[in-house]
Image (tube, helix red, strand yellow):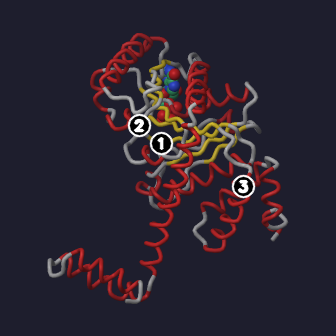
Amino acid sequence: MSDRGFEGTEDLISRLCQGDRRALARAITLIESSKAGDRGEAQFILDEALKAAGNSVRIGITGVPGVGKSTFIERFGLHLIGEGHKVAVLAVDPTSKVSGGSILGDKTRMEELSRDPRAFIRPSPAGGTLGGVARRTQESIIACEAAGFDVVIVETVGVGQSETAVAEMVDIFLLLLPPGGGDELQGIKKGIVELADLLVVNKADGDLKAAAERAAAEYHAALGLLRSPDPDWRPPVLQCSALAGTGIAEVWETIGKHQEIMEAKGARAAKRAAQAGAWMWRDVSEGMLERLRGDPAVAEAVTGLEAEVQAGKTAPGTAAARLIGLFLGK
Ligand code: GDP
């Protein structure tokens, strides 16, 4: 199968582990594929990739559209490359399914970073459920690490759907905030703030500098009222200008501090272990559901049962038990 430029799966894996970006792109295409054959090949690749994975800082970044995520990631990525790192950027964008278009799908994003051979940028996989997209992103992180990327950024739009999924696959979750306080502060969902390990007010430049400072102070005060989930880490509030490039180095330093503290007490390894376990169970539930839905006996009964449930003739629990029974051949 050299049609894709690789002499079979072994060759693809070996090139992937040598840091070949084309091999990485191909591996992720297989990971994202829903074809059964591709899935099998992707699993095989992942089992091998896993042996070379785990050596990156996994950073989640979220923020509402327009807050400056792509401008920030470009600056931040270029800064990291300048320090000798290799940076991969993956996107989780569940809106791509709903709207047909994608908030993160704009091709002109991160132009300079995407041209650099020390960076790898992959837009969001199109379609599928949030769970499916998240699983594929999680697997793609492993592939990026096997290819030697030591910083993996997972970007998501802060519209309240995918943040939890992303927070569950990274070491540190960064929330990028606009420089306004007041109403804008109200508009950001409290749940998202609670997920964040680090808050960064962007656009602290020019006319917006004073507003950014006020916003940072307000967030700082608001965070003081929340109970920090980790006694050793109270989420700091930083300011930066992605456009001017100020405050970017401090963000990286703060992430470094977080890593140090978490590693020292074994929390990073514990978090990753828990994430991997949860990931397995999510896969079990999704896989089981997929098989159940594909089962001929279930398929035959499901429409009728669903109608009975909707008409109030059969209790939902009874119908569910019957479907599971049919699937298990009982
Ligand atoms: P995204 O939708 O979150 O990815 O936001 P973009 O990175 O596309 O930025 C949205 C707009 O904000 C663009 O017009 C940027 O030029 C602008 N922007 C981004 N970062 C900054 C910044 O630090 N300062 C200022 N003044 N504008 C910025």
Horizontal and vertical percent for residue 58?
59, 39
Image height of 21 relative to 44, above or below: above
Q: Nearer the viewer, residue 62 or 173?
A: 173
Query: Looking at the image, is mark 3 or mark 2 earlier in the sequence?
Result: 3
Residue type at tag 1 = Ala
Q: Nearer the viewer, residue 60 or 35?
A: 60
Instruction: Give SS at disc 3.
Output: helix
Horizontal and vertical percent for residue 163?
43, 43
Instruction: Give SS at disc 1.
Output: helix
Name the image quarter holding residue 190.
top left
Which residue occupies 28% across, 29% down? 186
10 Å crowding of disc 2: few (<14), some (14-19), many (20+): some
Label count reads: 3
Horizontal and vertical percent for residue 281?
48, 61
> Where's the N terminus, which quadrant?
bottom right
Query: Looking at the image, is mark 3 or mark 1 earlier in the sequence?
Result: 3
Residue that badge 2 annotates: 195
Which residue occupies 62% across, 31% down? 74
Residue type at tag 2 = Leu
Name the image quarter holding residue 234.
top left
Gap between marks 3 and 1, in whole Å? 22 Å
Residue type at tag 3 = Ala
Residue that badge 1 annotates: 167
Which residue occupies 69% across, 54% down? 50
Mark 3 beta carbon near ligand 1 (under 8 Å)? no
Residue that badge 3 annotates: 49
Q: Is residue 41 left or right of residue 244?
A: right
Gap between marks 2 and 1, in whole Å? 7 Å
Which residue occupies 53% across, 43% down? 271
Instruction: Give SS at disc 2.
Output: helix
